[in-house]
Amino acid sequence: MAVSISTLEVGRQIGSTTIDITRQDLVRYAGASGDLNPIHWNQAFAEGVGLPGVIAHGMFTMGAVVQLVTAWVGDPAAVIDYQTRFTKPVVVEDTTAQPGEPGAVVEVTGIVGAIDTERSTARIDLTVTFAGQKVLVKAQAVVKLP
Amino acid sequence: MTIDPDLQGRSYPAGETYSVGREAIRDFARAVKATHPAHYEVDAAAALGHRDLVAPPTFAIIIAQRADAQLIADPSAGIDFTRVVHADQRFIHHRPIIAGDQLVAELHVDQVRAMGGGAMITTRAEISTVDGEPTATTTSSLLVRGEDQ
């Protein structure tokens, strides 16, 4: 593993990234996860239940943004505790006719929120925004470090 | 539909066994855009000390949502699934989920709170191997919107 607890400082940024999302990504996630709710792939259905459009699965966003942590820590199994609240939907536009064009872009930044030297763990706090608004709140991943 | 006020404290015993396959891990990893080689290559997972492919940190949602489905589909619970919104989620991993695991989930309804005309239901899935080794504890809060929300 690349990260050692002795070199960490609370408040230090571990990195940031952007995640492009298309309608196809949501269909892929629906299939892989088994969550087939039509609000994640059908415009008319989504609008019919009062949503502004097709929205990403909260669990898609939660699953995608933790990649920043696993890449940084070097072992996906190091993530021993991961939680979030879902506050705002990520609306994904239909860009099927514009290949390569994202339907939504989510921004994620991670900082070291807390260090527990006794348990040899660090809490990484993720800030996840879409169109300038936080879509996940209290997104925290606890990683076990050597 | 009305949420059964006695729902809190109810539990559902482990249902069908979920067999964790390599392709399921690879497909789920692709679906969440996870690129770590330990999700895709057995050698890369072995280099980190794992006996097979490592599932991404949120993979357990597949098993947790199957367990939640027991509750949502239970007519006596009184939950209208078309009005359910996922409010929060937590995964505590007692050990990583690895390809080859045979997992079961026991579901507990930890809390039911009235919210306007609806309710916030907190469920907990205790995921373990069929041999009883604790693997993960997942908690989900589901907001069931009332008729006017």
Image (cartoon, coloured by chain):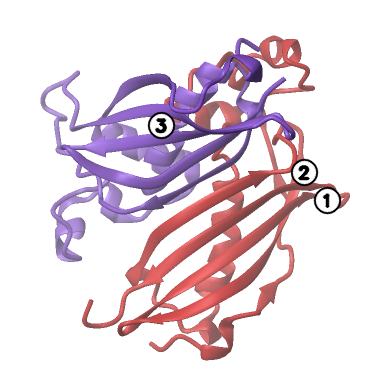
Chain colours: A purple, B red
Q: Amino acid at mark 3?
A: Val
The numbered mark 1 sits on a residue in which chain?
A: B
Q: Amino acid at mark 2?
A: Gln
The residue at the point 54 percent across, 86 percent down is: B76
Labels 1 and 2: the sequence-earlier one: 2
Q: Is residue A44 above or below residue B55?
A: below
Nearest the viewer among B41 and B35 is B35
The residue at the point 17 percent across, 58 percent down is: A51
User: To which residue does mark 3 refer?
Assistant: A65
The numbered mark 2 sits on a residue in which chain?
A: B
User: To which residue does mark 1 refer?
Assistant: B130
User: To which residue does mark 2 refer?
Assistant: B102
- Residue A4 appears in the picture as rendered: no
Q: Is residue B96 above or below residue B88?
A: above
Say what secondary structure mark 1 lies in.
Answer: loop
| The quadrant where residue A68 appears | top left
